[in-house]
Amino acid sequence: MPDAELTLGAFYKQLKSKEDLAVQTSWRAMQITTHRWSKAAAARPGYPLGAVFDFDPSMDHQAEMMNSFRNVALGADAARQNSEVRRSLNVGLRDHLRMSEGFIERANDNT
């Protein structure tokens, strides 16, 4: 909180509830992953799926959680969350699946 120059009370006033914090952070994590996948795929237009595979949950990623494969961590925890959090994660995962399908189609077109 000090880096954001917020007190804990000021931070929590921005949220409806503790559950809202889980919804917002889950949704943001999915957006970050989508952005990273899109950026990586654009850098490797000939093999976008390979660019996504570069984000696999390897041993290196365990040391640096900021760059980890968020879907693995979020998916494992989703069952314990409320319906709003699960809905947010489901929408994000569906988006990632659609994006992956597009990557696979592009890879098949290049073979």
Image (spheres, grey):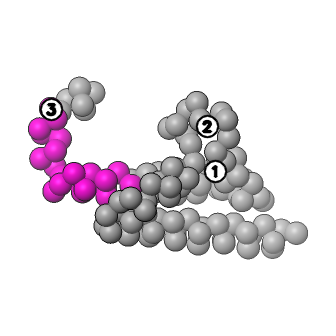
The numbered disc on residue 40 is: 1
Residue at 12 percent of width and 47 percent of height: 13
Q: Which of marks 2 and 3 is nearer the N terminus?
A: 3
User: What is the quadrant of residue 81 in the picture?
Assistant: bottom left
Q: Name the residue under label 3.
A: 7
Please tell me whether mark 1 sits on a helix, a strand or a loop: helix
* Contact check, label 2 and label 3, Cβ < 8 Å: no
Q: Mark 2 points at which residue?
A: 61
Q: What's the distance in space between the residues labelled 2 and 3, CA to CA? A: 31 Å
**Residue in front for this viewpoint, 42 or 7:** 7
- State left or right for residue 110 relative to residue 44: right
CA distance separating discs 2 and 1: 16 Å
Q: Residue at x 81, y 72 (%)?
A: 108
Provide residue 95's location: percent of width, then percent of height.
Answer: 52, 69
In the rendered view, tell whether residue 25 sits above or below residue 87.
Answer: above
Does residue 32 appear anywhere in the picture?
yes
How busy is the neighbourhood of tag 2: few (under 14 within 10 Å), some, or many (20 plus)?
some
Q: Are marks 2 and 1 in contact (CB under 8 Å)?
A: no
**Amino acid beneath label 1:** Ala
Nearer to the camera, 76 or 104: 76
Amino acid at pointer 3: Thr
The kind of secondary structure element at disc 3 is loop
Whichever of labels 2 and 1 marks the residue nearer the N terminus, that label is 1
